[in-house]
Image: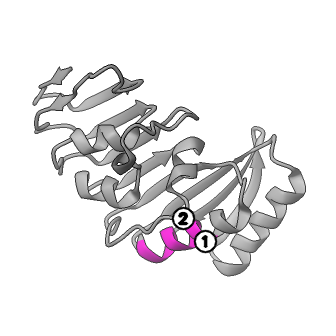
């Protein structure tokens, strides 16, 4: 697949896999402001993007099945911030967040103002550690939403939310539409 659309300002790209010898070539986007990437293999897709300084709003969606063909294509926030250095708003689904957990951010996200992440809390200490890393390195954050699905045990969600609010005093938590939302407004 070859993508060349320099005038696009909004784009939603859905790619299920690079299997069967498929290739992806993406040319520079000159006006792209909003991008939704939806793929089984987000790390591989990101590695095909040129550095795109115009993207401000980014959404990462990923199937539960990670593409394991290319071991070097793992999704990371370092890769996200390298490809999209001026992203100010980031939304991450639960599968993408799960793949990101446990990795370093590495000098990125200084311009990030808003993040929305869907958490599964499979490993609560790993999730908390990664949340701490995001808060420590993305110092410009003014709005953060962590959404915990209602299927996660209520006690687990409450303890996680309480731990976050104890560490970061500006956090406020509330139950809304079947999810627990943890917000911070600057």
Across and down, in percent, residue 112 comes to 37, 61
Q: Between label 1 and label 2, give the one nearer the viewer.
A: 2
Gap between marks 1 and 2, in whole Å?
A: 8 Å
Q: Quadrant of the N terminus?
A: top left
26 w.r.t. 163: above or below = above
Q: Say which residue label 2 marks.
A: 102
Image: magenta residue range: 129-137
Q: Residue at x 26, y 22 (%)?
A: 22
Res. 76 mark: none
Total marks drawn?
2
**Residue under label 1:** 129
Instruction: From the top left corner, tell me how far across and down residue 152 is, in percent.
Output: 81, 47
**Percent of width and height locating residue 29:** 14, 36
- Quadrant of the rendered image containing residue 93: top right
Residue 137 placement, left or right of 26:
right
Q: Is residue 134 magenta?
A: yes
The residue sitting at 16% across, 30% down in the picture is 25
Q: Residue furthest right?
A: 155
């Amino acid at each position: 697949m070859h993508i060349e659309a320099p005038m696009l300002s909004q784009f939603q790209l859905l790619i299920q896999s690079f299997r069967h010898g498929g290739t992806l070539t993406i040319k520079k986007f000159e006006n792209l402001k909003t991008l939704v990437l939806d793929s089984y293999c987000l790390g591989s897709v990101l590695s095909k993007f040129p550095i795109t300084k115009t993207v401000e709003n980014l959404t990462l969606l990923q199937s539960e099945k990670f593409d394991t063909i290319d071991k070097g294509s793992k999704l990371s926030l370092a890769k996200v911030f390298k490809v999209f250095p001026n992203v100010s708003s980031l939304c991450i689904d639960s599968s993408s967040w799960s793949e990101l957990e446990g990795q370093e951010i590495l000098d990125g996200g200084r311009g990030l103002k808003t993040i929305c992440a869907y958490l599964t809390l499979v490993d609560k200490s790993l999730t908390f550690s990664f949340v701490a890393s995001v808060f420590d390195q993305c110092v410009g954050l003014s709005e953060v939403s962590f959404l915990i699905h209602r299927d996660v045990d209520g006690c687990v969600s409450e303890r996680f939310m309480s731990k976050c609010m104890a560490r970061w005093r500006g956090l406020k938590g509330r139950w809304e539409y079947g999810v627990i939302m943890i917000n911070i407004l600057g």
